[in-house]
Image (cartoon, rainbow, N blue to C red):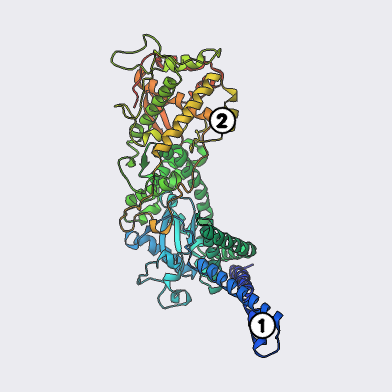
Amino acid sequence: MTGIGGVEMGALAARTRALAVLRVRSRAVAVALLPAAAAVILLVGGSTGHLVGGGWDVLRRVVSVLALCVLLAAAGVALVVARSRPAVTPTVTVAEESAPDLYRMVRDLADRLDVPAPSAIALTPDCDSWLEDRAHPRHGPPPVERHDDDLSGPGGPARRRSAAAAPVLVIGSPFLWWMRVGELRAVLAPVVAGTGPSAHPDIAAARRFIRGLDAAVAVASADRRDPLSRVACAGLGWVSRLLLRGCREHATGMERGVATAAAERAQAVDYGLRIVAQEQVGLAYAGWDRLLTRVALPAWRMGRWPSRLDVGVVAALTELSRRDRLAEGFASRLGERPACDLLEEPGTMDEAVSLLAARLFHGGPAETGPDWSPVGWGEYPEEVVDRTWRTDAARLHRVLDTLGVRRPAGGTAPGTDGPTLARVLDHLAIPDTEPPAPSPTDPPTGYGDPGTPDAPAPGAGAQAGYGDDLGAPPPRYGDHDAPDDEDEDDLAGTTARGAALAAGLSAQLAREEARARPGGAGVPSSSPGAGPDAALWDGRALPLLPLQPPRTGREILTAHITAMVCCAAMDTAGAAPGLDWLDGPSLLVDGARTADLAPSVLSLVETGDPGPLRAWMTDLGIRPEKPVRLV
């Protein structure tokens, strides 16, 4: 099949499926009009003297009332489908004055493909690119600007189409920073080519109908207290879902045909380079996922959001190319022009995308404040890693106080409360004979207790760990209100004291996260061309895309013990907090990253054997009996 033939066949298949979707809509309208047609027949028959009698009169009244009710219900459903706001991906709009080179490249690409140019460009914190229709009245009209090289001008079918009707081109921000200009153009070619089939009236109408049904289902799913509203929403949801089921197969075939036509048309533009660029897509996705889960998430938990995530993904992938000999060729690409040079102010755009990523993946506030401030990569070790470890260590000792664990006699330095690592080791290493009883003469010290001078800063109490900086899989973050049966199964292989301590830590974390959870989502203030499109999406259900499932009790306990060990290493052996681009927070001893702590901590947690951990600390000169500084 030739390229032109593939384009025609794909477009024909898409239009055929679009007509099938529209036929479903027509059948629904016909069903809604059927009682009205029957009522008209009965009324006309009575007026002409053909359908007379008491039975016909009753039937006319019943059918007329039924027709009126069906018409009112159908009109209500049609109004909701037409007026409901379809779901829109949260993005950061790129104004043309802030990226003229990027707009010029996209218009040139659309001109070469002979398709309409996208009406606007937006960035999303994801490794993907797509077209999104935002022509719905509830979204507001897209900006319509005329340019000398605008494809909406005269000169061909593509140029005669209105730019306002074209969809928005959404680009994954990691692509702009990691890919070179040529690679980005090759990756965007099949995406931009999709504006051609999208402009067909039948396909556009079918998509509007499906998006309206989807929005109507969302409206019907909203909580309602009024019984009448609940009944109306139940009927609306049933009808919308029924129509969606009827359209599902045809809609899938339509989108498949559009994608086929776009891919065939894009083969004429940078096809060879696209094959190479697809390798960079997978690499960027891997680096972005690792950066979010191991580097950004610990900072978000501390009430700080890294303001240069896209710069960080470049650093992470560069580090990967240095470590992995299979990726050595990727470093040579860095000498070419990066696609972020197409932006006038890449730093401002990176900051806006980074804040949006924190909103989507963590549910942070919409704008900066005392409890939610940006952090640079140079400040990350001190502001995030060090504070995370000391916050976890303070929480660990606070839970030990709650459990009534005594502090070692004589282990307290003058002028301090004496939080030591030895206290943790002695508690977990003692054989399990009976649970320790609280001592009335040993009151809790309240390390890091709210309201004391050593209390964690607002937002710091929500920290749930820091990732595994020492080689093991990173701990999982999320809501710590996990089911009790799962926690019991997870802690079945640990000691009784370890299980009790893990349960106490899990409960304390749940309380702290409940207090630190943002109460509302304000509308962010943004400068032109750099800010989340807050008016286009609902921020009440955040995070929209949580990164990881809840941590288990064993993972929580392991993370807190590791944090305490790292604090002891920093305060007694001269170690320092560090940042590893691929593994997140790390402990540096003499400038080198330690990589063998995790097995020793797991041995203590699972079997109560402190021997491997004590040997590891002895080799590094760590003194567990010395008090450490907490937050």
Depth check, mark 1 against mark 2: the one in front is 1
Q: Tell me if mark 1 has few (under 14), some (14-19) or many (20+) residues whose alpha carbon lies within 10 angstroms of its own.
A: many
Tell me if mark 2 has few (under 14), some (14-19) or many (20+) residues whose alpha carbon lies within 10 angstroms of its own.
some
Q: Secondary structure at mark 1?
A: helix
Q: Residue at x 60, y 64 (%)?
A: 239
Please, is residue 158 above or below residue 183 in the view? below
* Amino acid type indicated by mark 2: Asp
- Amino acid, disc 1: Leu
Can you give x and y, in whole percent of width and height, for residue 308 in the image? 36, 45
Sooner in the amino-acid sequence: mark 1 or mark 2: 1
Res. 330 in view: yes
Q: Quadrant of residue 589?
A: top left
Residue 10 in the image: state x and y as whole percent.
60, 67
Where is residue 612 shown, x and y percent of the image?
51, 16
Q: Which residue is mark 1?
A: 42
Specify the farthest residue to the front: 54
Q: How far is the residue under mark 1 from the one under mark 2?
A: 68 Å
Evaluate whether residue 464 shows in this view. Answer: no
Q: Please name whichever residue, 154 or 452, is drawn nearer the observer in this view of the structure.
A: 452
Q: Is residue 601 left or right of residue 394?
A: right
